[in-house]
Image: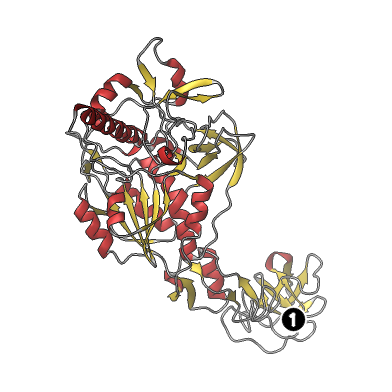
Amino acid sequence: MSDADADSSLDRATDEALALFADDRRSHHALPADRPADRRAERTAHDVDDAPRGSTRAPFAYFPFDEIPVGGGVVDGGRSVGTTPRRPGPEDETGPATAIAPAFDAFPFIDVAEDEKRARHMTADATPHCAPHSTPWPTARAVAAAAAEALPAEERPLGDALGQVLAEPLVALTDLPSFDTSAMDGWAVSGPGPWRLPPPGEQDVLAGRPGTGPLRDGHALRIATGARIPAGATAVLRSEHGEVTMQGELLANRHVSHGQDIRPRGGECRQGDRLVPAGTVVTPPLLGLAAAAGYDTLTVTRRPRVDVLVLGDELLQEGLPEGGLIRDALGPMLGPWLRALGADPGEALRIGDDADALYAALDTSTADVVVTTGGTASGPVDHVHPTLHRLGAELLVDGVAVRPGHPMLLARLAPGRLVVGLPGNPLAAVAGLLTLAEPLLCALTGRAVDEPARAVPVEEVPGHPADTRLVPVTYAGGRGRVRPLRFHGPAMLRGLAAADALAVVPPGGAGRSVEVLKLP
């Protein structure tokens, strides 16, 4: 090889290594925790202008693979807010790349000269996954909602159907109430008073007892709430509205109207009435209505079976963090969260950073959905993309333009088998849950996706120039107003634990109101 060829080869390798390094920077949210020394301190966008004057450390902007500017900074409103090395990609053949706005919620300040030096020592053979572009957040949710159909229906006893979704309308099997009943304790009376009473303790009308004979005009009988109204009765006189004389007559101390305090048969519904439509989530009140209407079982959509795979060698299951290890926050959180979304999650399986173990778990899983945590970026131990490729999976969503959580994904392994890849940072993983898992599980369970409510921020909620932001908020003086919480970094749970909802801040920032996603 000539010296010129060698130099050219070195230049190409350097360019590709720089591309790899830039992509590693772009995917910093999911870097493995065993590389803490390589992590730069994250700075939010409003800190960019605080960089030391004359410093060689420049704010680094992240870009999708085929949208890297050919050089220089990224301009936002005439102000340079980021620089990035030249990256090879499809634009080399199809035309110049299009610049997009940089990330807003995390600008690591890096030493460009130092990074170029480090990149020259990286081999160009490494070819980590690079998502060609990020799907807009609303589009990603729509794709997830359309990725599956409702699962088959099943019969469940009333006590086991809570939280599932009706696969058929709930139709009344009987009239409610099924006979005229007393709404109060008192006396069933016939005609205007005063009324004659039977001897004390005789012929009282009690709930659950056989009915008495017809009540004659001018007579009354003691009656309990819920008891069947005797034939001939015209009203119920409440206990507190009547008094019995020494002669055994019943007198009313106020006017008694015809039909007063009688619940007529079929007053709530008639047999065959449609009470609740299909697609309704079974709640405790619905269980009560179903029982009253004559049901012993309900026809509901089967709960999706979900396997949870927790990736990362750095995760501890118990005890205090030590020796570069951290506690696994997602394993304990995901099961209850998925159950609240209508799924039937199994116990979380901890795999670590083992590509073969991940392959085996995905290949042998019989769950409807597999949820993975971590490993969705393009670091040296991020195995999700290569494993999905090895399994021949179809990527439906590969990266979402949302902060935090942009390296999330949705893939189809085979008909009826889907994978939701969540980032490893806790708040970023929750963003993935609400972006991809929630609409997918709604589709599988047959429930409608809740329309986000809107609220007015009482404090400024900064936006990102190009991406949607999901910000933990708490209600401020009612559900119509929200206040952003401080601790909203991708790796933080403190803000989320105190939050009532997540505010959806569209690209460019919030207007007078924002959508809010409720939390379980």
Is residue 252 placed above or below 200 in the rendered structure?
Answer: above
Determine the residue positioned at 49% across, 62% down.
443
Location of residue 154 in the rendering, given as x and y in whole percent from the top left corner: 44, 75
Tag 1: amino acid: Ala
Location of residue 21 in the rendering, given as x and y in whole percent from the top left corner: 30, 32
> Can I make out residue 248 in this image?
no
In the figure, residue 411 lies in which quadrant?
Answer: bottom left
Determine the residue positioned at 40% across, 65% down.
304
Query: Image quadrant for the N terminus?
Result: top left
Figure colour scheme:
secondary structure
Is residue 26 placed above or below 41 in the rendered structure?
Answer: below
Determine the residue positioned at 62% across, 83% down.
202
How many numbered marks appear?
Answer: 1
In the figure, residue 275 lies in which quadrant?
Answer: bottom right
Is residue 349 placed above or below 508 in the rendered structure?
Answer: below
Answer few, some or many: residues within 10 Å of disc 1's Cα (few below 14, many 20 plus, some between 14 and 19).
many
- Give the residue at the far front of this rendering: 2
Determine the residue positioned at 80% across, 65% down.
254
Towards the viewer: 116 or 157: 116
Towards the viewer: 470 or 412: 412
Q: Which residue is mark 1?
A: 233
Towards the viewer: 190 or 144: 144
Towards the viewer: 383 or 258: 383
In the figure, residue 509 lies in which quadrant?
Answer: top right
Is residue 167 placed above or below 69 in the rendered structure?
Answer: below
> Can I make out residue 21 in this image?
yes
Q: Secondary structure at mark 1?
A: loop
- Give the residue at the far bottom of this rendering: 213
Location of residue 107 in the rendering, given as x and y in whole percent from the top left corner: 40, 27
